[in-house]
Amino acid sequence: MNQKKVCMIGVYGTGKTSLVQQYVHSKFSEKYHSTVGVKIDRKVVEVIGENLTLVLWDIAGKEGDEEVPASYVRGAHGVIFVADFTRRETWDELPAFDELVQGAAGVVPTVVALNKADLTAQRVIAPEDEQKFASKWDIIHTSAKTGQGVEDIFQRLARAMVKVPGAAS
């Protein structure tokens, strides 16, 4: 079976683990559990008529000056950057994360989960901010809590990875 490594990258507390848990297990917890290092989950999906195993690397979030290790990103076939609707600094880190990914894995399909979309009253990322990156990344509003956009973000990335010519499996 074809396997694809997907890295979840973002600042701490953006909901990376919650998105994975919602996608893989249809669960959401209000409790915050900080990821230490990497947590790996798998999910088999059907994409363009073929079964594909997504190997989901939930990487500990960047905190302060602590960087995401490039070794975690090497070999990635796709990336989901996760930013928090309610915290500007999580959005501002995306270009640095993109640079990290390109240095460690090359140019790979990338999507952005603008998470916590259920907290619309606390939104600080403006539509104009999204427009700046719309030509580079597919940006999807997600909520790990309600499930909004969760299936969509993983399906879009899976389709993009299958369409990439010469992508390793």
Image (spheres, grey):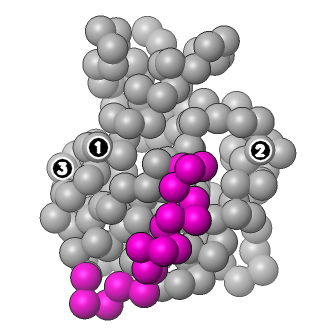
Reading the image, the residue beneath label 1 is 152
Q: Is residue 62 above or below residue 97?
A: below
Task: Say which of 116 and 125 sits in front.
Answer: 125
Q: Which residues are magenta?
A: 120-137
Question: Which of the labelled discs sits on residue 26, or is there none?
Answer: 3
- Crowding at dot 3, Cα within 10 Å, few <14 / some 14-19 / many 20+, comes out as some
2 falls in the magenta region: no
Give the secondary structure at mark 3.
loop
Residue type at mark 2 is Gln
Comes first in the chain, label 1 or label 2: 2
Reading the image, the residue beneath label 2 is 102
- The residues bearing labels 1 and 2 have C-alpha atoms spaced at a distance of 24 Å
Q: Quadrant of the N terminus?
A: top left
- Crowding at dot 1, Cα within 10 Å, few <14 / some 14-19 / many 20+, comes out as some
On the picture, is 133 further left or further right than 98? left
Q: Residue furthest right?
A: 103
Q: Position of residue 95 (x, y in %)?
A: 70, 63
